[in-house]
Amino acid sequence: EIVMTQSPATLSLSPGETATLTCRASQSVSTYLAWYQQKPGQPPRLLIFDVSTRATGVPARFSAGGSETEFTLTINALQSEDFAIYYCQQYNNWPPVTFGQGTKVEIK
Amino acid sequence: QVQLQQWGTGLLKPSETLSLTCAVSGGSFVGYLWAWVRQSPGKGLEWIAEIDHSGGTNYNPSSRATVSLDMSKNQFSLTLDSVTAADSAVYYCTRRRLRPRYGPFDSWGQGTLVTVSS
């Protein structure tokens, strides 16, 4: 099973600042890496797939990159609606598909 | 735009059977894997199992679940026998692309809170 490790656990930032989130895989996941955003009481929402492709309707301030085992999600100029929990997920080596434990982006 | 609407029993006693159903509208079963994911405070997001339109299944090795599909009703279901408190979680139905290459979970149900308590 591929273990996904996210850091930091919590990121405290002000609106307008840039958030940089990291996700590490215990072994290579090639380009099968996704990022999700989750707000309280809602299901996860797909933001990024195949490492760097934005899902439909995702604003351009969300960008992502990386390869093999190290990946980042960057959110430029944080908006109020961006404060949420973000999860990475690998779908290269399964079963099982695995998720990271999440990074909470909170208002400072 | 595909929509997933799920329902099922929310409160169970230990040893009972969890049963959830997800109805799919606005999309075809073909070309996708139809999955169940659960979320608990202790274990985060956990993929349970998935099924394709032909009935092919994939299971988390740690799972006791059974997934099934009823294409005539545009529904798929999750059954989990002999539940314990550790099975308490929010359960989501979701889907991911099968071709041309496997994809992430791009549509989700609203979630069902399942609590196991005596």
Image (spheres, coloured by chain):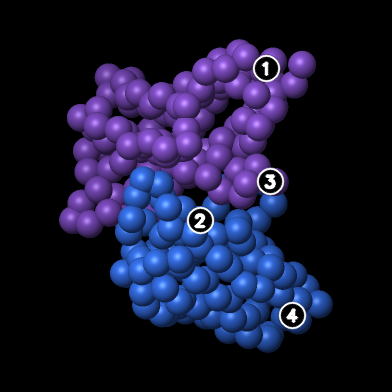
Residue A42, image x, y percentages: 62, 48
Task: Provide the chain ID for the residue under circle 2.
Answer: A
Secondary structure beneath dot 1 equals loop
Marks 4, 3: nearer the viewer: 3
Q: Are marks 2 and 4 on the same chain?
A: yes
Which quadrant of the figure has residue A75?
Answer: bottom right
User: Which residue is label 4 attached to?
Assistant: A13
Tell me, for residue B14, which label it has, or none: 1
Q: Amino acid at mark 1?
A: Pro
Marks 2, 4: nearer the viewer: 2
User: Which residue is label 3 attached to?
Assistant: B42
Residue B22, image x, y percentages: 45, 29
For residue B34, say whether it is visible. yes
User: Which residue is label 2 attached to?
Assistant: A99
Q: Are marks 3 and 1 on the same chain?
A: yes
Q: Amino acid at mark 3?
A: Gly
Residue B104, image x, y percentages: 38, 55
| Label 1 environment density (alpha carbons within 10 Å; few <14, some 14–19, many ≥20) | some
Closer to the camera in the image, B25 or A31: A31
Looking at the image, residue A54 lies above or below residue A95? below
Which quadrant of the figure has residue A9?
Answer: bottom right
Mark 3–mark 2 distance (CA, rounded to whole Å): 13 Å
